[in-house]
Image: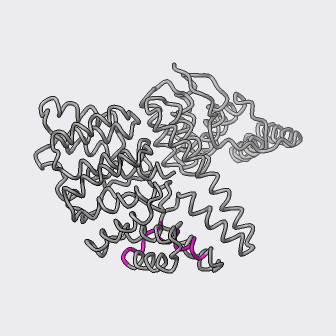
Amino acid sequence: MRKLALLAALVCSCGCNSRSAKPPESTADHEALASPVVTADASHAGAQAGAQDQPDADDDSLRQAQKLTNQGQLAAAVEACSNYIGTHPKSSQAFRLRALANAMRHNDADAAADFSTAIILEPQFAAHRIARGLFHLTHGNTTKAVEDFDVAIKLEPNNAQALNNRGMARVTSGEIKAALEDFNKAIEIEPKYVSAYTNRSYAFVKLDRRKDAMTDLGVALNLDPKAAGAFDSRGTLYLETQDYQKALADFTKAIAIVQNNPVYYHHRRTALLKLQRYDEAEADGAKVEHLMRLVSLNESVFRDRQSPKPYLDRGNYLLADGQLGDAIANFDHVISLDAGQWRAYVGRARALVRKGDCQKAIDDASTALKLEQNEDAYAVRAEAYRKLRQFPEALADYDAAQRFDADVAETWIAYSKELRASGKTKEAEDALKRANDLKALDAPRIQRVAATTAAPTKK
């Protein structure tokens, strides 16, 4: 998961500070689900390169490309950059922006070429070297990453960001003492550099200087009480000293700050087991499994952004987890890619029913049925009709969905009461008989919270 953290950081190196709530093509999922122990810093506010690196105010096209990259609309960002490069072939920023977007799309060869072009066009600009260094690091090429950070530091000896990132690269390659020197220098330049303290604490642990590591984590948390990675790292040190209550408290604080990091839940589970709080530990274990599945789904989306299937699978998973808004966003995106995906309409209809927007759910289910006659669409439309107390329509759809369970029996009972209230005694008795017949079957309730995740087919 370290690669995910660095790849997310890479996007920030052009000034990205957007953290939207899981839109279908967001990179925020990667950042939130990544390990924070030793992290690259691509958007450090005090870095000289970062301060110089914003597009000019009149470069509307570049600013739009930046916005598209921040939002995860990477194909559109690449196109916008390419159009700008067509009229501004010596814009190093445009090449680097396109490199970032291509890196996130896993078009590694194109990204590497664009990073190099940006450096050729503006070789004295340290930010280009830092960006390419991070790119190399995400792809496991620590040697080339260090080379780029070396050049950035030669260009700007007091660039704390470059020093911190080189230290992180050196930790990754096992050069702990050299990494410690980089972190020391970064902190000397900027005494309030939180990431450098957190990273230095990790180097101290590797050197078996745990007291110093604990001190650094305390400083980091005093500077930034929302530094989730520092809480997690300190909790891990408390685990080593068997201070399980303090470890539990720190892991819980980390989770409160970043709720979707499986590492934090895994660590808290360890503390809970040590405290013999087994039910809570089991719940955290289940959360880890859930988040790791979500990591896998996010990776599938990033690998194939033009295919509806990854978005459909992720939408169904989020729906089952009760994240209705995020599920709908994914189903929306499936439909934008291919309006013939009936499963996306069914999934969105299920989410809409649970949100109480039953008429829209009926519309979606009806659209799905026009595309493909299927029991799932009839079933969800029946649920929507039932909530609107349109019982004849609901029962007709239940029948088409071949549903004969307790929910259908309760719908017949409700319909019977409505008929009786309107003076239709015989029809009410018939409806009640249907309900009793269904109850006699003793069929279980069917939990249909998500549409099938079978591979969608083109229509």
Q: Nearer the viewer, residue 36 or 182?
A: 182
Q: Which residues are magenta?
A: 223-238
User: With 30 as the anchor, is 356 left or right in this view?
Assistant: right
* Residue 52, x across and y down, in percent: 16, 56
* Residue 120, x across and y down, in percent: 18, 39
Q: Nearer the viewer, residue 126 or 353?
A: 126
Q: How many marks?
A: 0
Q: Nearer the viewer, residue 179 or 130?
A: 179
Main SS of residues in magenta: helix
Question: Which quadrant would residue 250 be assigned to in this image?
Answer: bottom right
Question: Which quadrant would residue 25 be assigned to in this image?
Answer: top left
Q: Residue at x 18, y 50 (%)?
A: 125
* Residue 229, x across and y down, in percent: 47, 66
Q: Residue at x 54, y 49 (%)?
A: 356
Question: Which quadrant would residue 263 be assigned to in this image?
Answer: bottom right
Q: Residue furthest right?
A: 440
Q: Nearer the viewer, residue 97 or 325?
A: 97
